[in-house]
């Protein structure tokens, strides 16, 4: 997830997705700044040859690294700035609510005539845009894994805190009712192996 906000935007609660903190925060994530200068300098050839020998990271690993850098930048731009070692589940919830201002998913209020309708609204309404639950759930999963890899102490992982899980559950239930969409996972049918063939007659 890459986000860009200006200093005038309040640090409220917003997020990005389409189905599937403290004071004002200025958050700018530049994902490919280093790659833009890969052809500069005499060492470009050497770097390209060395990079070709090492496998490129998967899409998941690249996204996880961007999310981790984005959260670190959010902490640095927080007012007052926050250290990762002092980050708690409350700061994670602040971050998730902050992301809602970048949301693209319409969440209809109960009084809205389009509440609970899974089809797109045929007319505009004043209901807010929010981050989709699926986007937030995936984001927390990547940040939880990145914390374990970079910090190495799962017991203090704020992304795995009970408060974060409860928040995501509330978002899922609210959006499920508002959008008329079920987020329940379908149970897979168990496939039983065929019985062995009968022994051949002597």
Image: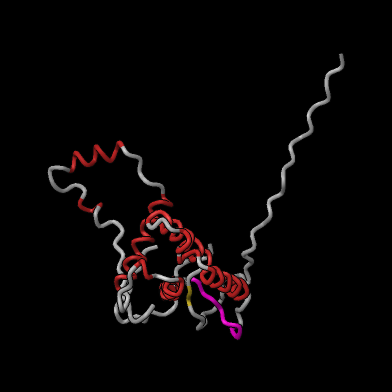
Residue occupying the point 12% across, 43% down: 42
Residue furthest to the left: 42
| x and y percentages locating residue 90 in the rendered image | 45, 75
Q: Is residue 107 magenta?
A: yes
User: Quick one: 40 or 159, which is closer to the camera?
Assistant: 159
Q: Main secondary structure of the magenta part?
A: loop
Relative horizontal placement of residue 20, taking residue 181 as reference (left or right):
left
- The quarter of the rendered structure image containing the C terminus is top right
Q: Residue at x 49, y 79 (%)?
A: 128
Q: Which residues are the magenta region?
A: 105-112
Task: Work out whether residue 131 can be spotted.
Answer: yes
Residue 195: image location, x then y, percent? 79, 33
Q: Position of residue 24 (x, y in %)?
A: 33, 80
72 sits left or right of 130 in the view:
left
Residue 66: % across, % down? 36, 58
Q: Is residue 148 above or below residue 170?
A: above
**22 sits to left or right of 45:** right
Quarter occupied by residue 158: bottom left
Q: How many marks are shown on the rendered structure?
A: 0
Front residue (pair 96, 49)? 96
């Amino acid at each position: 997830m890459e986000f860009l906000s200006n200093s005038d935007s309040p640090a409220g609660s917003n997020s990005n997705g389409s189905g599937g903190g403290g004071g004002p925060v200025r958050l700018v994530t530049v994902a490919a700044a280093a790659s833009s200068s890969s052809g500069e300098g005499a060492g470009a050839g050497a770097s390209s040859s060395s990079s070709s020998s090492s496998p490129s990271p998967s899409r998941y690993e690249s996204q996880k690294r961007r999310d981790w850098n984005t959260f670190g930048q959010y902490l640095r731009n927080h007012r007052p700035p926050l250290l990762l070692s002092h980050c708690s589940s409350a700061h994670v919830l602040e971050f998730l609510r902050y992301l809602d201002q970048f949301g693209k998913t319409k969440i209809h209020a109960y009084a809205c005539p389009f509440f609970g309708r899974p089809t797109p609204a045929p007319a505009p309404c004043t209901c807010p845009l929010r981050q989709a639950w699926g986007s937030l759930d995936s984001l927390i999963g990547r940040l939880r894994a990145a914390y374990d890899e970079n910090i190495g102490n799962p017991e203090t992982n704020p992304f795995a805190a009970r408060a974060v899980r409860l928040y995501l559950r509330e978002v899922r239930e609210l959006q499920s009712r508002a959008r008329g969409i079920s987020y329940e996972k379908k149970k897979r049918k168990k496939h039983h192996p065929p019985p062995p063939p009968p022994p051949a007659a002597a």
